[in-house]
Image: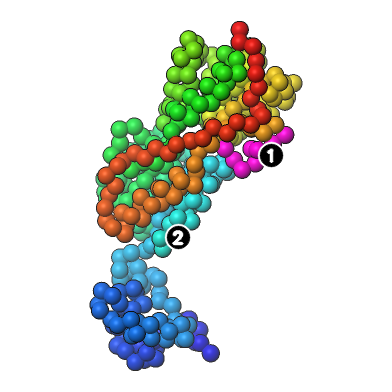
Amino acid sequence: MPKAYSNSTLSDVAREANVSVSTASRVLNGLAEKYRISRSTAQLVRESADKLGFRPSQVARSLRLKRTGLLGIVVPDLSNPFFSSIARAVTVSAEAEGFSAILADSGGAVGKEKTLIDQLTTRSVEGLIVCPVGLNFEHLETVHQQGMPLVVVDRCKANSSMVQVTSDHIAGTRQAMKLLLGNGHRHIGVLQGIAGTLPCDQRLQGVQEALTEVGARLDSAMIAGDQFTYESGYTSARKLLTTNPQITALFAMSTPNAFGAYQAAIELGLRVPDDLSLICFDDVAFADFMQVPLTTVSQDVPELGRLAASLVTQQLVHGKVPAQKTHTIPVTLLTRASVGKTSPS
């Protein structure tokens, strides 16, 4: 019967395999090839470790090799399916490369984001993947300049030397607006997220470009909202629909915004899509199963997370900083039942 892990030592393994302690250590730390230890000896050491139930101390190994195998992930809101999906994709991809992840939620606050990043770096994470609040990047730039492998996801910064991964917000919004405009809508309200963040600004740009193509313009009175949340979507939708009764469609910048808008429409006695068309950026697994399936611009969230994880782990494994700084992932328009036709006026 194998010994308990806590009672078996490296010396026990070396004695069982009839090798030196240094040889046993090198094999169990994955250094057999480097030190030209034969395959048969390495196999014998591993079999002896399994027989004795020995597992090397990860703390001691980390101190010795100056490696922890830990990545830090910071997101602004884990209750948002978009960010929780990114976190999962990063975790799965990192684990496939032999790394573990520590996940933290900044609650959408820059101050807390800074604190969490400080805590993670002092806990010896080897790399960071951050979906930032998006209003201040100085602390992230500092981490980047200090040499910590860092990838920023989603709310990126224009003209930055940091490695960044984001979706094609402009093209996706143009696709959404083209669908609305093609169905005759000209009075379109916009439920925005956090103004000044890259996704919000680029999606507004996409709205403006699409309207310009048909000789229309975006009136500031048709824009409301200040967060990518259900509450912001609900409040801003009620505001727009009561002050601008001519609105026939809403473009929401996130799925939570759209859910809030849907509830507001119900309370105002508006039917989707008969009285009001609704389309949003983002997609969730159950959008297709709503009473009125939601038309969305779907981001490739698994790819956002997978690529971010890969860009960090490749820096750690191979020591090479990616030459390409900004990586833009294509999006897909998923047409469902929440958009209907109207007569332009």
Circles 2 and 1, Cβ within 8 Å, touching? The answer is no
Residue bearing mark 1: 289
Q: Main secondary structure of the magenta part?
A: loop
252 sits to left or right of 293: left
Residue closer to the observer: 222 or 98: 98
Q: Residue at x 30, y 42 (%)?
A: 324
Q: Is residue 189 visible?
A: no
Considering only vertical position in the picture, is 217 above or below 293?
Answer: above
Left or right: residue 262 versus residue 207 is: right
Q: Residues within 10 Å of mark 2 (few under 14, many from 20)?
A: some
Task: Write the residue at 40% across / 76% down.
Answer: 56
For badge 2, the amino acid type reads Glu
In magenta segment, residue 22: no
Residue 8 drawn at (x, y percent): 44, 85
x 36%, y 34%: residue = 157
- Front: mark 2 or 1: 1
- Would you call the spot at circle 1 few (<14 residues within 10 Å), some (14-19), or many (20 or more)? few
State the extent of the magenta-drawn residues as a range. Answer: 283-291
Q: Which residue is mark 2?
A: 95
Secondary structure under badge 2? helix
Examine the rendered structure and indicate whether residue 192 appears above or below residue 43.
Answer: above
Judging from the image, what secondary structure is the residue with disc 1 in? helix
Say which label, 2 or 1, has the lower sequence index. 2
Amino acid type, residue under disc 1 in the picture: Phe
Q: Residue furthest top?
A: 345
